[in-house]
Image (cartoon, rainbow, N blue to C red):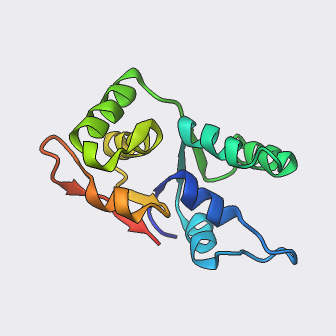
Amino acid sequence: MIPPIVADTGGLLRALARTQDGRPSFPEFAAILTSAAAVIVPALVLAEVDYFLRNERMGMRALMAEIFDPSTRYEYEMPFPSDIARALELDARFAALALGLVDGMVASVAERRRIYRILTTDRRDFGAIRVGPRFSRALELLP
């Protein structure tokens, strides 16, 4: 089992994607999702996933059931006001990236929870930002 991860929208969508015969479309993403000790899903990520799955309601309902099932490794993370403030601060600090609120929230939750491993497809943004009191901590991008 690998240490806990924070899931970003793209990483979560790829980890859940399946081929027509039910196999993972992106096995390296699926393997991380299934082997992590915990999968932290920030609330804003779940809202963004819902947007992308708007034409796949059965899949979204199944994901919701799994995330809110206490026997799974998923942890739904409600935003604290301080997370939103920090997300906005990160967005301003790294303005050239145009992070936006969701990516800022992923980074702020990772920072607060001290879980610096991010399941993501967004290597450009998450590879460039730094968290921590002195903005010196890099995030570990998976896969």
- Residue at 53 percent across and 63 percent down: it is 36
Q: Looking at this rendering, what residue extends furthest in the left direction?
A: 134
Which image quadrant is residue 3 in? bottom left
Q: Residue 137 at x, y = what percent?
A: 21, 54
Of residues 50 and 7, which is closer to you in this image?
Answer: 50
Q: Residue 131 at x, y = what percent?
A: 24, 47
Residue 12 as seen in the image, left or right of residue 21: left
- Residue at 57 percent across and 44 percent down: it is 75
Q: Can residue 121 be seen in this view?
A: yes
Q: Residue 43 at x, y = what percent?
A: 56, 35
Of residues 12 and 38, which is closer to you in this image?
Answer: 12
Q: Residue 83 at x, y = what percent?
A: 37, 30
Residue 115 as seen in the image, left or right of residue 18: left
Q: Looking at this rendering, what residue extends furthest in the top direction?
A: 81
Q: Is residue 70 visible?
A: no
Q: How many labels does the image show?
A: 0
- Residue at 70 percent across and 42 percent down: it is 50
Which image quadrant is residue 104 in? top left
Residue 93 as seen in the image, left or right of residue 104: left
Residue 60 as seen in the image, left or right of residue 41: right
- Residue at 64 percent across and 75 percent down: it is 26
Which image quadrant is residue 48 in? top right
